[in-house]
């Protein structure tokens, strides 16, 4: 049996010790030596771990990959992204990095900060179902059980309010990343704690089931025209299965064609399933018929094209406040389409999930809400209850991600 592969993100407030925790884990698991770590940055910096582009320019291709693959006795873990990385929020939302699990890092001396709440809400909105909560910097509170218990209870109510109904079952692991306490070995300084170490908790993460029984959906990332071959769209299969010989349709324009061949990593294949990044040659479609952001499906269950939709959003940043009539860009899978907030339907307390106000005048940073969006041109988006993989979107304006959301209902393009 091959070990499960899990894509992991680290989330939490900016100074709560995410980098130190990753650095320490890498040292304890023997991926990187203590010497390399101290030479690299003095303090271990995420950019160094995550930013391959810069990395690869600077020293060839030798280093980038190893540092993100952790092998435990139970699973393979790929650290796919982390805050501090430029497009973290946007990547997390649009699926450039589909996380299966998250480590939420909270400092014991600081407790829950706005960003803690924001990142946790984001993880929930994006369908990250498995969480490990690392209560870090226990050394700064004298490894006190009382501080741990109180923070654990506060976090359980925060996470259940956001929507994690099983919040009390998550592992809440007290650690000191800086001193390596309770990371891979039980800590004598916290003998009162009977739960798993951080590593043991990471080993409980499982690989989610692949959605092969859902209708086929492949967001197109890029299109090539290959001499002697023809049109070759590139994309990642989100749901369903694509086979050579299939008739397919590209939405929102409705162009159809037939799959002549499928390739992954320059290997030819007869079928592709969820998670596969593929190039596929299509007969009957020219390069000008297809663009980035189109979605491929089968003609009997084509991708849903919406002119407007209703969504649950969490507001991450706005210059002042978000009101109806506001017109940003909506990034969904590989598409980005201008639209406007036609109506703010409800304001929701992100801590409890309860409706605070019907038809609010505005939403501010940290608020959650139900909104109606009208798109200025048709876009493929799906209901979260049907195909969650294509229901998530980011709202961007002025170069920043101001909200994240998921589509709960939609109006099909007439």
Image: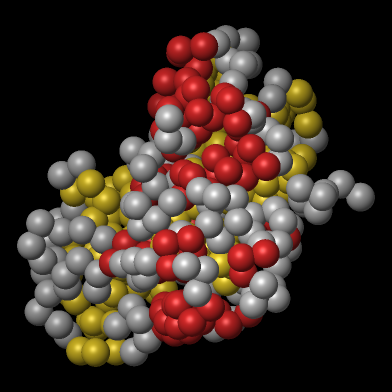
| In the rendered image, the vertical position of residue 57 relative to residue 114, given as above or below | above
Q: Toward which corner of the image does residue 229 lie, by quadrant?
A: top right
Residue 184: percent from the left, percent from the top?
A: 70, 53
Does residue 188 show up?
Answer: yes
* Residue 23 relative to residue 106: left or right: right
Q: Position of residue 395 (x, y in %)?
A: 27, 55
Which residue is situated farthest in the right direction here? 1
Along the line of sight, which residue is nearer the eye, 19 or 401? 19
**Vertical position of residue 338 compared to residue 408: above or below:** above
Considering only vertical position in the picture, is 185 above or below 269? below
Residue at 16% from the left image edge and 70% from the top image edge? 364
Residue sitting at x 71%, y 41%? 29
- Quarter containing the C terminus: bottom left
Left or right of 25 in this view: 391: left
Is residue 217 visible to the viewer in this orientation of the structure? no
Using the image as rendered, state which of residue 56 and residue 39 is in the foreground.
Answer: 39
Question: Which of the two residues, 339 or 321, is positioned nearer the viewer here?
Answer: 321
Residue visible at 67% across and 42% down in the picture: 28
Q: Residue at x 58, y 15 (%)?
A: 61
**109 in relation to 55, above or below:** below
Horizontal side of 410 relative to 215 (left or right) equals left
Please state the horizontal and vertical placement of residue 144, each as a whole percent of the image. 50, 74
């Amino acid at each position: 049996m091959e070990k499960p592969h899990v894509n992991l993100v680290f989330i939490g407030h900016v100074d709560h010790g995410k980098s130190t925790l990753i650095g320490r884990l890498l040292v304890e698991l023997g991926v990187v030596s203590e010497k390399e770590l101290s030479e690299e940055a003095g303090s271990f910096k995420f950019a160094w771990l995550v930013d391959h582009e810069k990395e690869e320019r600077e020293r060839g291709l030798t280093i980038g990959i190893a540092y993100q693959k952790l092998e435990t006795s139970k699973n393979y873990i790929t650290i796919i992204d982390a805050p501090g990385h430029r497009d973290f929020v946007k990547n997390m939302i649009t699926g450039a990095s589909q996380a299966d699990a998250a480590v939420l890092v909270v400092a014991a001396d600081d407790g829950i900060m706005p960003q803690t709440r924001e990142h946790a809400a984001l993880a929930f909105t994006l369908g990250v179902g498995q969480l490990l909560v690392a209560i870090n910097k226990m050394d700064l509170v004298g490894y006190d059980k009382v501080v741990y218990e109180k923070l654990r209870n506060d976090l359980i109510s925060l996470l259940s309010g956001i929507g994690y109904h099983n919040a009390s079952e998550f592992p809440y692991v007290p650690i000191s990343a800086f001193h390596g306490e309770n990371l891979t070995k039980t800590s004598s300084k916290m003998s009162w704690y009977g739960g798993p170490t951080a590593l043991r908790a990471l080993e409980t993460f499982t690989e989610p089931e692949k959605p092969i029984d859902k209708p086929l959906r492949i967001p197109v990332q890029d299109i090539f025209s290959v001499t002697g071959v023809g049109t070759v769209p590139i994309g990642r299969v989100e749901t369903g299965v694509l086979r050579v010989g299939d008739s397919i349709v590209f939405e929102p324009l409705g162009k159809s064609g037939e799959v002549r061949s499928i390739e992954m990593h320059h290997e030819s294949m007869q079928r592709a399933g969820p998670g596969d990044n593929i190039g596929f040659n299509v007969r009957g479609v020219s390069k000008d018929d297809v663009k980035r952001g189109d979605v491929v499906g089968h003609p009997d269950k084509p991708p849903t094209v919406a002119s407007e939709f209703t969504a649950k959003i969490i507001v991450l940043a706005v210059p002042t406040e978000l009101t109806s009539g506001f017109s940003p860009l909506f990034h969904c899978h590989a598409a980005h389409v201008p639209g406007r907030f036609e109506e703010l339907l409800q304001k929701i307390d992100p801590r409890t999930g309860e409706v605070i106000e019907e038809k609010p005048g505005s939403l501010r940073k940290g608020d959650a809400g139900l909104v109606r969006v009208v798109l200025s041109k048709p876009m493929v988006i799906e209901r979260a209850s049907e195909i969650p993989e294509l229901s998530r979107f980011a709202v961007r304006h002025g170069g920043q991600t101001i909200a994240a959301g998921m589509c709960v209902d939609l109006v099909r393009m007439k």
